[in-house]
Image (cartoon, grey):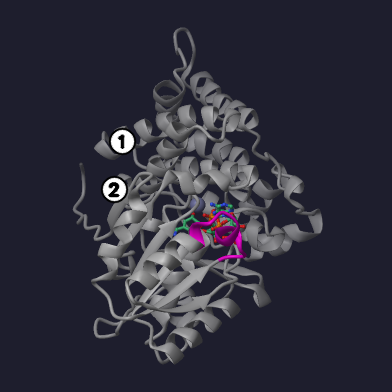
Amino acid sequence: MLGNFSYYNPTKLYFGDESLNFLKDELKNYGPVVLLNYGSGSVKRNGIYDQVVAILKEAGKTIVENPGVMTNPTLEKLNEGVKIARENEADLILALGGGSVCDYSKAVAASVYYEGDYWDKFWLKQQNPDADQKLLPVGCVLTMAGTGSEMNAGTVITDAEHTLKMGHVFDSRLMPKFSILNPKFTMTVPENQMKAGIYDIMNHIMEQYFSNFDDNTSDYLAEGLMRSVITSSRIAVKNPQDYEARSNIMWTATWALNTLIGKGKKQDWMVHMIGHSVGAWTHAPHGYALAAVSMAYYRRAMKNGLPKFVRFAKNVWNINGDGLTDEQIAEKGLQALKDWMLEIGLPLTISELGATNEMIPGITETTVVYPAGYLNLTKEDVTEILKESM
Ligand code: NZQ
Ligand code: ZN
């Protein structure tokens, strides 16, 4: 392990089909007013809302509801949540949903007691709250696996007016205080969202794996997680009700992005930067936007990162390299990735997501570009990647 780093993750996890039982214990740690954030209604249809509300009522909490948190939550909705939390003096924010609701809840938690322009400070300027700023605690009852938002400090918010999707990873103060992960709750996730979540997990791991060439424990962990998500995804796509596969997917998602496997790594995240921009323009599910630009991106990255792509082919996809050049082995690894994406039904082009040639300049313009894993992209390169992904 080269370099110096700290590892601290304060999120307490409760995992399994009985994990919601622990919510009542957690609630004892917080004041009476709970801001309950949820999305467009799936939690009401599948009964999770009723279960959570019953526990909140039994604990004597005052419930302030904030429904309608959309997928890819907007700045406008953030403003609304901040206002509700201020007016009701919320003590705890409880997120009931997927990554969008969880991200959104952290965004509200960071902004409630900031008196200035929180969008400018936290997302545009990428700053953290000052040391003396009060932050609200967040708990999460997760209903969809993918983002890892349940155990990280990431918050992705979209300024719809300017078609700008901005992520900010806060410091550990904004990590959820607790997260409840019941794989059964993910069983009602629509098939396309389940697949999007699966690729999101895979890509989070790849974004961290495809950087550096040193021998690093993080890469061995990453390879194990990738093998797990590939195995479980194949089962879950055939039988979405397979608890074992869905539970593996949920647990892998958490470990894919709770900062552990990024330790000692430069990391990449350019697929996410381009994918976020595609998402802002097309409103595609997050994981689909990533999938659709991945092949064009990784074909480029392979040229500079050849030894790691050879390792990816051998250790993740079991490619037998006998008699092959490194380039041929790496190619076979990328082909295996593509075949798996086709097998589980992921989109491989942005045109499938509704992107048009006319959108490419705008998508390029709103993509945040920086020197990443093995590449130092220019805006022109981003345009080329988008064209190759059409
Ligand atoms: O609106 P509701 O009713 O909640 O329905 C959601 C939504 O339509 C539905 N859903 C979730 N759980 C369900 C369910 N439907 C039926 N049964 C259930 N159990 O699925 C749809 C998608 O949900 P959403 O929360 O939007 O998906 P996801 O978990 O993929 O979150 C996406 C957001 O997370 C951000 C993305 O950019 C995007 O805004 N990300 C956050 C990250 C982080 N915090 O570190 C990293 C990621 O890379 C990502 O950028
Ligand atoms: Zn992601």
Left or right? Give the position of 276 relative to 209. right
Q: Is residue 20 above or below residue 304?
A: below
User: Is residue 206 placed above or below 4 in the rendered structure?
Assistant: above
Q: Is residue 101 visible?
A: yes
Residue 352, image x and y in percent? Answer: 75, 45
Q: Is residue 172 left or right of residue 80?
A: left
**Residue furthest to the top:** 323
Q: Which residues are magenta?
A: 39-49
Residue 40 within the segment the image draws in magenta: yes
Q: Mark 1 near mark 2, Cβ–Cβ under 8 Å? A: yes
Q: What residue is disc 2 on?
A: 260
Kind of residue at badge 1: Leu
Q: Secondary structure at mark 2?
A: helix
218 lies left or right of 345? left
Q: Is mark 1 within 8 Å of ligand 1?
A: no
Residue on which disc 1 sits: 221
Up/down of 92 relative to 154, above or below: below
Tell me the tag on residue 347. none
Residue 305 screen position, x and y as percent: 44, 36
Give percent across and percent down for residue 49: 50, 62
If the image is split into quadrants, where does the C terminus sit? Answer: top right
Label 2 Cα crowd, 10 Å radius (few <14 / some 14-19 / many 20+): some
Position of residue 188 relative to residue 176, above or below, is: above
**Alpha carbons under labels 1 and 2: distance apart:** 9 Å
Query: What amino acid type should be assigned to the residue bearing mark 2?
Result: Leu
Of 361 and 273, nearer the camera is 273
**Is 214 placed left or right of 109 in the picture?**
left
Q: Nearer the viewer, residue 358 or 72?
A: 72
**Magenta-span inclusion, residue 306:** no
